[in-house]
Image (cartoon, grey):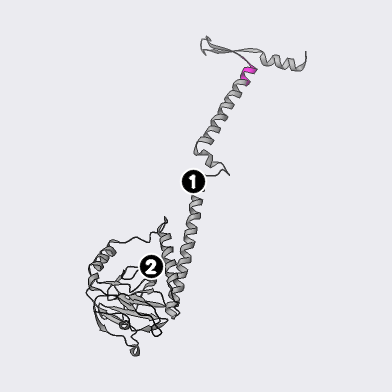
């Protein structure tokens, strides 16, 4: 008889496994087993354990603890971080442009803003407004109340049109008076007073004289809360000593839109008023020459 047959017969050889009472030696249970039955039982148990472990790894979060296995939440977070980084990059680029514009204004290097540029900025504003991260059309309750007040006073306001011509190079622009008030100090370049001072009641809204883009919305020791707007045809308007600024750098504003509240901020201010300046092609001009005031 070959060794294989001997080994096979040994696997099939039956053994009697008896469970007896320890004290009386009475037989309680007995089993008839062979080595083959034991091997098959052990293999079955191992297979069941392997199936349970595999199922736990596939259908439960345990798979995340396996080195090298990707986490779905991590992938989503990476995608979100990529989107956020792109948005931050655009914001940084926009802020860099704003800082450049402010630097040019402070240095007197103001570039003209033509109608096409203003139209492109408005188109960019509409594009950002349609996105899911920036809402440029949001209007606060305080600004809405100011706009209602402006609408109520619209009958008493008037617009001055700047006629075009060789001696008036700004073209057919229309300018709003920035404030309903009386003039306390006129334009006087000889005394370095490059604007006019307008006095009005407390909480009176200050309005943009024309369409444009806010290039400066900040605070200085001398002028307090100051806002500057660049308009088309190289015209820049400055509004100083405000108590509250309603717009920030980069905002697109329309003629007659509230941009600030009259105030008394800054060391150069001696009472609630607006110091208003107009600069055309880097040179100051008398606002009374282009705007009619009450």
Q: Secondary structure at mark 2?
A: strand
Residue 220 seen in the figure: no
N-term mark: 2 or 1: 1
Graded by Cα atoms within 10 Å as few (under 14), some (14 to 19) or many (20 or more), the crowding at tag 2 reads: many
Which span of residues is magenta-colored?
32-39
Q: Is residue 157 above or below residue 145?
A: below
Q: Quadrant of residue 153?
A: bottom left
Q: Position of residue 69 (x, y in %)?
A: 56, 43
Q: Position of residue 251 (x, y in %)?
A: 38, 67
Q: Is residue 208 above or below residue 37?
A: below
Graded by Cα atoms within 10 Å as few (under 14), some (14 to 19) or many (20 or more), the crowding at tag 1 reads: few
Q: Quadrant of residue 124?
A: bottom left
Question: Is residue 198 rendered magenta in the image?
Answer: no
Q: Position of residue 227 (x, y in %)?
A: 35, 73
Determine which residue is flagged by label 2: 252
User: Which quarter of the rendering shows the N terminus?
Assistant: top right
Q: Is residue 190 above or below residue 163?
A: below
Determine which residue is flagged by label 1: 73
Camera-side residue of 272 and 164 = 164
Q: Is residue 195 above or below residue 242?
A: below
């Amino acid at each position: 008889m070959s060794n294989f047959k001997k080994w096979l017969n040994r696997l099939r050889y039956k053994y009697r496994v008896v469970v007896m009472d320890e004290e009386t030696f009475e037989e309680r249970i007995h089993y008839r087993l062979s080595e083959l039955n034991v091997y098959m039982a052990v293999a079955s148990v191992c297979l069941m354990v392997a199936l349970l472990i595999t199922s736990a790894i596939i259908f439960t979060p345990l798979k995340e603890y396996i080195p090298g296995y990707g986490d779905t939440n991590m992938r989503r977070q990476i995608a979100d971080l990529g989107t956020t980084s792109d948005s931050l990059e655009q914001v940084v680029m926009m802020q860099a442009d704003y800082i450049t514009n402010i630097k040019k204004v402070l240095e007197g290097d103001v570039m003209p803003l033509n109608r096409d540029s203003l139209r492109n900025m408005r188109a960019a504003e509409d594009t950002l407004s349609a996105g899911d991260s920036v809402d440029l059309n949001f209007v606060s309750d305080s600004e809405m109340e100011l706009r209602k007040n402006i609408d109520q006073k619209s009958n008493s306001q008037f617009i001055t049109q700047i006629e075009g011509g060789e001696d008036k190079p700004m073209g057919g622009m229309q300018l709003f008076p920035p404030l309903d008030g009386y003039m306390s100090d006129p334009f006087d370049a000889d005394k370095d007073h490059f604007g006019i001072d307008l006095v009005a009641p407390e909480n009176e809204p200050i309005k943009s004289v024309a369409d444009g883009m806010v290039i400066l919305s900040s605070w200085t020791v001398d002028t307090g809360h100051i806002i500057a707007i660049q308009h088309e045809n190289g015209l820049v308007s400055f509004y100083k000593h405000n108590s509250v600024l309603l717009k920030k750098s980069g905002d697109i504003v329309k003629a007659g839109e509230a941009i600030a509240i009259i105030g008394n901020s800054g060391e150069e201010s001696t009472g609630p008023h607006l110091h208003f300046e107009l600069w055309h092609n880097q040179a100051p001009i008398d606002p009374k020459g282009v705007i009619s005031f009450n």
